Image: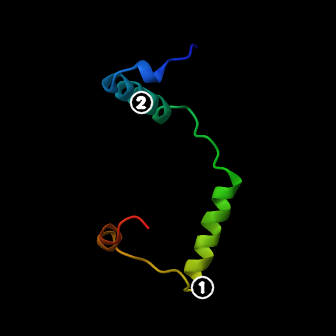
Amino acid sequence: MHTIDIEKMTTQEQLQTMEALWDSLTHAAHEPASPVWHEEIVQARREKIASGQATFVSLAELKANGPQ
């Protein structure tokens, strides 16, 4: 495998390369394991929901408020 100089690629070439990478990843025989910290965050969020402390917003509200 050789290094590709991404900066020298056209936008079209970059997009084609990215699409090829995504296609390769989606057809991989196995998925990578989730990192431990990910499960910790998911569990903390589940606990917050179960305890009634979680708050939710609709997609429309999220879009209206913009990035925080």
Location of residue 2 with respect to 59 vertically, above or below? above
Q: Position of residue 3 (x, y in %)?
A: 55, 17
Q: Residue at x 49, y 19 (%)?
A: 5
Residue nearest the viewer, comparing 18 with 36: 18
User: Residue at 42% of width from left, 19% of height from top?
Assistant: 8
- Residue 68, image quadrant: bottom left
Label 2 sits on what residue type? Met
The residue lying at 63 percent from left, 57 percent from top is 38
**On residue 18, which mark appears?**
2
**Residue farthest front in this picture:** 7
Numbered badge on residue 51: 1
Tell me where residue 22 appears, x and y as whole percent: 44, 33
Q: Is residue 48 left or right of residue 55?
A: right
Question: Can you name the residue that lies furthest to the right here?
Answer: 36
Q: How many marks?
A: 2
62 to 22, vertically: above or below:
below
- Which residue sits furthest bottom? 52
